[in-house]
Image: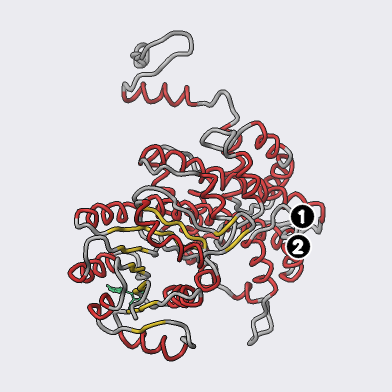
């Protein structure tokens, strides 16, 4: 009997996805470059699931029913190209490759074209939910041709996370749409994670709260408007004790945040497309700053920060408001980017559907998505409309108070303040860009427009300057 689907790449995500597919009743052939990993996986984790281990790429391909459906779960980058090249001689036109890694959307664009020219169908599929999600139900964001999607739709729907609004999978859009959307998902994820971290920082540095107390607060918040996977895991993290020392583990973790690039790519794409994503960008920058641990240690000696620790439970409510405010704006900036990309790249995105797919399984799943979906149709690209502005205005005093406390105590809050400033700029009729235009014209003769008449103007600014 032939397998209904094949999967290449047996790191944990690949293993878990293979198990998830097999547990839904599909026969899966698996292959990994390093054969020992395949053997080890088969012997240690496969317990009666319909999984066929293969140790040669040709055997792997031959074990699949036609048209073949092959999911790649290999490391993003050249490994995807290497694997595609190795597969090609064994494939027939009409076969399908699904790249389930975190590939850069421009790589997906290139691969889509390359494989289309060879008659091979290709999907670039964002997979979110980490190892747990891969096994129990991820959020899936497949992009490519609809014909390719239809070949695997049934399987994807079965393995995806389920919500009251259906399985967390949909056809995202043309070509690299799936990986673009997954990239933006991660950009939003960076911003929300940083906003939560800033709130945590204020709780410990200006409120003197201990880990368990903070865990209680996050747990409480998770029951209301802030209900989300990231708030939920933050509570769990803060409660976790290191077995060796008996201390909260979070206090023992080095404050250097790593990244795999998706947040940076989001900021790059946003700058390229001319979409303001301040909160997302600043979250990436702050991870970069965190890396300079040695410099920070030295420089912290040069600026002693006096902090008045005040137990003010009142402030907790304000922190909550600031986090709601920043979370909404992180989402809305990401949505704006997706809307512009959809037009620019002809993705044909249905943003409400994208948000639906983010309701379960993925890292940024949260209650707020329902609200976002309600306003997504009656707002412009950017989600700032009558209803959302009224919503944000309710939290404005909280944000102001939080930023004031942060400034007084010299605690950095780049994403909370970026969100605040983004909102102020977006709601400001007059920005000082008139002065910037004058400066540009002064030194570069770039010309400027006027508010009182049509045309492009240039002045000889040096006239009369001695
Ligand atoms: P490996 O076990 O042989 O290293 C995550 O690293 C997954 O990507 C692993 O399954 C790994 O296989 C695979 N991988 C990394 N680089 C690869 C390459 N150049 N070709 C094929 N698979 C690769």
Residue drawn where x is 64% and y is 67% of the image? 233
Q: What numbered label is drawn on residue 316?
A: 1
Tell me: is circle 2 under 8 Å from ligand 1.
Answer: no
- Residue at image coords 59%, 44%: 329
Query: SS class of the residue under badge 2?
Result: helix
The residue positioned farthest toward the front in the image shown: 1
Query: Is there any visible trace of residue 466 in the rendered image?
Result: no
Q: Are discs 2 and 1 less than 8 Å apart at CB?
A: yes
> Left or right: 123 with respect to 366?
left
Residue 453 vertical position relative to residue 345 in the rendered view, above or below: above
Q: Residues within 10 Å of mark 1 (few under 14, many from 20)?
A: some
- Circle number at residue 197: none
Q: Secondary structure at mark 1?
A: helix
Q: Position of residue 365 (x, y in %)?
A: 60, 57
Cα separation between marks 2 and 1 = 8 Å
- In front: 143, or 37? 143
Earlier along the polypeptide chain: callout 2 or callout 1? 2
Q: Quadrant of residue 306?
A: bottom right
Q: Quick one: label 2, few (<14), some, or many (20+) residues within 10 Å?
A: some
* Marker disc for residue 217: 2
């Amino acid at each position: 009997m032939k397998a209904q689907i094949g999967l290449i790449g047996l790191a944990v995500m690949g293993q878990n996805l293979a198990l998830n597919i097999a547990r839904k009743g599909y026969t899966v052939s698996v292959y990994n470059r390093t054969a020992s990993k395949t053997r080890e996986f088969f012997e240690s984790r496969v317990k009666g699931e319909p999984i066929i281990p293969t140790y040669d790429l040709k055997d792997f391909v031959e074990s699949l029913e036609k048209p073949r459906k092959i999911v790649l779960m290999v490391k993003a980058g050249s490994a995807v190209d290497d694997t595609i090249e190795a597969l090609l001689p064994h494939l027939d036109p009409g076969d399908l490759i699904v790249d389930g890694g975190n590939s850069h959307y421009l790589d997906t664009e290139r691969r889509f074209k390359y494989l289309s020219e060879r008659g091979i169908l290709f999907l670039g599929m964002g997979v979110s939910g980490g190892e747990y999600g891969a096994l129990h139900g991820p959020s899936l964001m497949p992009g490519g041709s609809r014909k390719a999607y239809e070949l695997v739709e049934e399987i994807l729907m079965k393995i995806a996370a389920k919500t009251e609004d259906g399985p967390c999978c949909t056809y995202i859009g043309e070509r690299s749409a799936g990986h673009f959307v997954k990239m933006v998902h991660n950009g939003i994820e960076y911003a929300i994670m940083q906003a939560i971290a800033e709130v945590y920082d204020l709780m410990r540095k200006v409120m003197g709260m201990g880990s368990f107390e903070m865990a209680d607060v996050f747990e409480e918040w998770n029951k209301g408007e802030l209900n989300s996977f990231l708030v939920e895991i933050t509570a769990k993290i803060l409660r976790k004790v290191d077995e060796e020392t008996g201390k909260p583990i979070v206090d023992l973790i080095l404050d250097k945040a790593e990244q795999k690039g998706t947040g940076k790519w989001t900021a790059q794409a946003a700058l390229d497309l001319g979409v303001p994503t301040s909160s997302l960008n600043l979250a990436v920058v702050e991870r970069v700053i965190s890396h300079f641990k040695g410099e920070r240690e030295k420089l912290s000696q040069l600026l002693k920060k006096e902090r008045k620790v005040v137990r003010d439970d009142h402030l907790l409510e304000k922190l909550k408001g600031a986090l709601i405010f920043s979370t909404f704006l992180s989402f809305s900036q990401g949505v704006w980017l997706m809307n512009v990309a959809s037009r620019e790249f002809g993705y044909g995105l249905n943003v409400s559907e994208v948000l639906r797919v983010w309701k379960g399984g993925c890292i940024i799943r949260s209650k707020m998505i329902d609200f976002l979906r309600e306003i997504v149709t009656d707002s412009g690209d950017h989600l700032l409309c009558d209803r959302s502005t009224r919503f944000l205005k309710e939290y404005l005093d909280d944000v102001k108070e939080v930023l004031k406390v942060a400034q007084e105590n010299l605690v950095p809050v780049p994403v909370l303040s970026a969100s605040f400033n983004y909102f102020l700029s977006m709601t400001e009729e007059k920005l000082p860009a008139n002065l910037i235009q004058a400066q540009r014209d002064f030194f570069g003769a770039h010309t400027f427009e006027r508010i009182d008449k049509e045309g492009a103007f240039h002045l000889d600014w040096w006239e009369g300057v001695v």
